[in-house]
Image: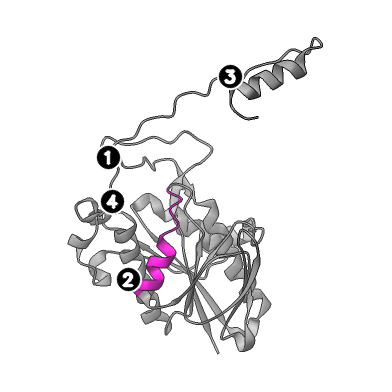
Amino acid sequence: MSVNIVVPVKYVPDAQKQRTFREDLTVDRSDAILSELDEYPLEAALALREAAPEAEVTIVAVTVGPATASGAVKKALQMGADAAFHVDDAALAGSDALGTSAALAAAIQHVGEEHGGVDLVLTGMASTDGEMSVVPPMLAERLDFALVTRAGTVEWGQDHNGLALTRATADATQTVAVAFPAVVSVTDQANEPRYPNFKAIMAAKKKPSAVLALADLGVDASTVGRDAAAASVQSATSRPPREAGVKIQDEGEAGIQLAAYLAEQRLL
């Protein structure tokens, strides 16, 4: 048997640096990295492959974005993905989640055509730039796949025909079985992503990676991009600098001062 896994990955601004916007209010991605939250589903896919060599797992990374987004699939290949596809088309500029999910779904279907179907799509629980968490359910709807969100553990199900998952809710931990084909979003508590060593980095250079346009995927350019977006950023302002908190000097009356401050803030 064989199992084909697709991992969508995203190139996002480095969260450790200040985020800036262009004049059209799109995020400046000139200094971007692979979204850290996308490393967890990729690690989950690699762990599944290592746990069941007989399953003949193939892992394909896909991304949507401008030329600079190639860094996302490059990192995915270095971590261990077998192949990658990058959807790069000027018409995608300014796309919202609807447009992005349409392009991703078409890319996943393209992977299926080349690899004999797609069994599993593993995604991050969100992207570190938007944190909307809506693309996984959109992909499941477009692909007509089962959906499980925020999986905390990811293991094989019986006979490798699905997965056994756990997911934490506010008051319980659920054990979930899902059959293929499925879309599963993975939390940042699921595993510890590996760091590619020199050998893996060099091997990634020989792995297949292709750039696709919307026309290659049969996606109408008028259905994506800024003009087709159902949601758009109308304004963006920087947060005001944080003010220093109140300092209480302990000269024997610190407890009284603290109680007075809490009462003033209506916290008592």
Determine the CA span between mark 4 and mark 2: 21 Å
Whole-percent x and y of residue 92?
27, 55
Quadrant occupied by the C terminus: top right
**Badge 3 element:** loop
Please tell me whether residue 216 is drawn above or below residue 228 in the rendered image: below
Task: Quickly name the residue at label 3.
Answer: 244
Circle 3: residue type = Ala
Please tell me whether residue 64 is drawn above or below residue 208 in the rendered image: above
In this rendering, position of residue 84 left or right of residue 45: left
Determine the CA span between mark 4 and mark 3: 36 Å
Circle 2: residue type = Ala
Determine the CA span between mark 1 and mark 2: 29 Å
- Looking at marks 2 and 3 on the same chain, the residue that comes earlier in the sequence is marked by 2
Q: Nearer the viewer, residue 246 or 239?
A: 246
- Residue at the (58%, 24%) spot, across then down: 265
- Looking at marks 1 and 2 on the same chain, the residue that comes earlier in the sequence is marked by 2
Q: Nearer the viewer, mark 1 or mark 2?
A: 1
Task: Quickly name the residue at label 2.
Answer: 106
Callout 4–callout 3 Cβ contact below 8 Å: no
Task: Quickly name the residue at label 4.
Answer: 231
